[in-house]
Image (cartoon, grey):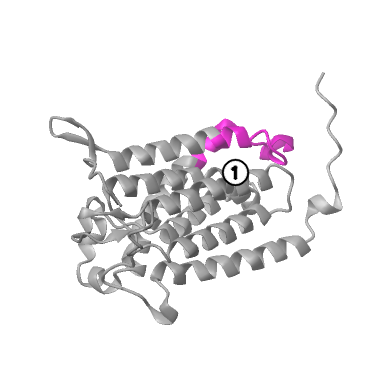
Amino acid sequence: MLVHPKIDPIALQLGPIAIHWYGITYLVAFGLFMLLAHLRLKHEPFRSVQGAGAWSRKDVEDMLFLGVLGVVVGGRLGYCLFYKPGYYLTHPLEIFFVWQGGMSFHGGLIGVIASQVWFARSRSKPFWQVMDFIAPCVPLGLGAGRIGNFINGELWGRAADPELPWAMVFPQSGTAIPRHPSQLYEFLLEGLVLFLVLWLYGRKPRKEAQVSAVFLVGYGVARFTAEYFREPDAHLGILAFKMSMGQWLCIPMILGGVLLWVWAETRITPADRHPAAPRSPAR
């Protein structure tokens, strides 16, 4: 049985300035997005778009900036609305106390979607083409965030069989119960596995919205599965049908992703009516 090493959440202290490991994982996530997005520019259909709608490195930078705003604003508001609506209704000013913690992936996703609607309209790009561009670049960043959760010793797992080789005691939980290191499960499922699926699927031309649909289904299934090993929020516990709030929020993601994929498969686009001419090989 393992014991969480209780890593100091502060990676570097410079006088009154403290650099936290969790903040570093966010920077790693943004750096990975930039790297993967630049590689994504070489994939179809993005490298073949010509004229005013052509994709550039400047687009990647602007998408990241808007995406960061969407993650922070949407993630915070989503946590307040989904997980503690009663508390923040009576303490509205604490919505802005982001340093106290409390972010929601599902709220962040809504924030990112809203930010990219604005980006797509401002650049005259098809919205679903924008979202398909982004989707494979996101999972490794999510995985970095889960490593941050593990370093902080937060969002620990449910009780595990002590005979499980990787069962871990989290002293931060206030008990000596061996638990699943669910943060690492989520790192593997939401981070590495989802990245590989989306990167391989998105390398080839797909109908608009299908890569986004696979992201919704893939993340929904990964998170839904991991939630069986993650300790539910203490103030919510297990909800109806023995599911956690995280699982309930994943259900519309999965259903929406399936419907989106089917809609994209049956939709006739201008590109279907007027397919682009094949490109000449580089000489």
Would you call the spot at circle 1 few (<14 residues within 10 Å), some (14-19), or many (20 or more)?
A: some
| Residue 35 point in image, percent of width and height | 53, 32
**Left or right: 132, with 85 as reference point:** right
- Give the SS element for disc 1: helix
Q: State how many labels appear.
A: 1
- In the rendered image, the vertical position of residue 1 relative to residue 80, given as above or below: above
**Residue lying furthest left:** 15
**Left or right: 189, with 128 as reference point:** left
| Residue 165 point in image, percent of width and height | 38, 52
| Residue 233 point in image, percent of width and height | 30, 67
Of residues 48 and 28, which is closer to you in this image?
A: 28
Of residues 78 and 204, which is closer to you in this image?
A: 204
| Residue 251 point in image, percent of width and height | 52, 70
Give amino acid for label 1: Arg
Asked whether residue 122 appears in the rendered view, the answer is no
Residue drawn 49% across and 56% down?
A: 114
**Residue lying furthest top:** 283
Report the quarter where the C terminus lies. Answer: top right
Residue 144's image quarter? Answer: top left
Is 56 one of the magenta-colored residues?
yes
**Residue lying furthest front:** 163
Asked whether residue 14 appears in the rendered view, the answer is yes
**Left or right: 6, with 260 as reference point:** left
Residue drawn 86% across and 38% down?
A: 277
Residue 235's image quarter? Answer: bottom left
**Left or right: 72, with 254 as reference point:** left
Is 34 one of the magenta-colored residues?
no
Which residue is identified by label 1?
A: 123
Residue drawn 21% across and 60% down?
A: 94
Per the picture, the main secondary structure of the magenta-coloured stretch is helix
- In the rendered image, the vertical position of residue 120 relative to residue 164, given as above or below: above
Magenta range is: 36-63
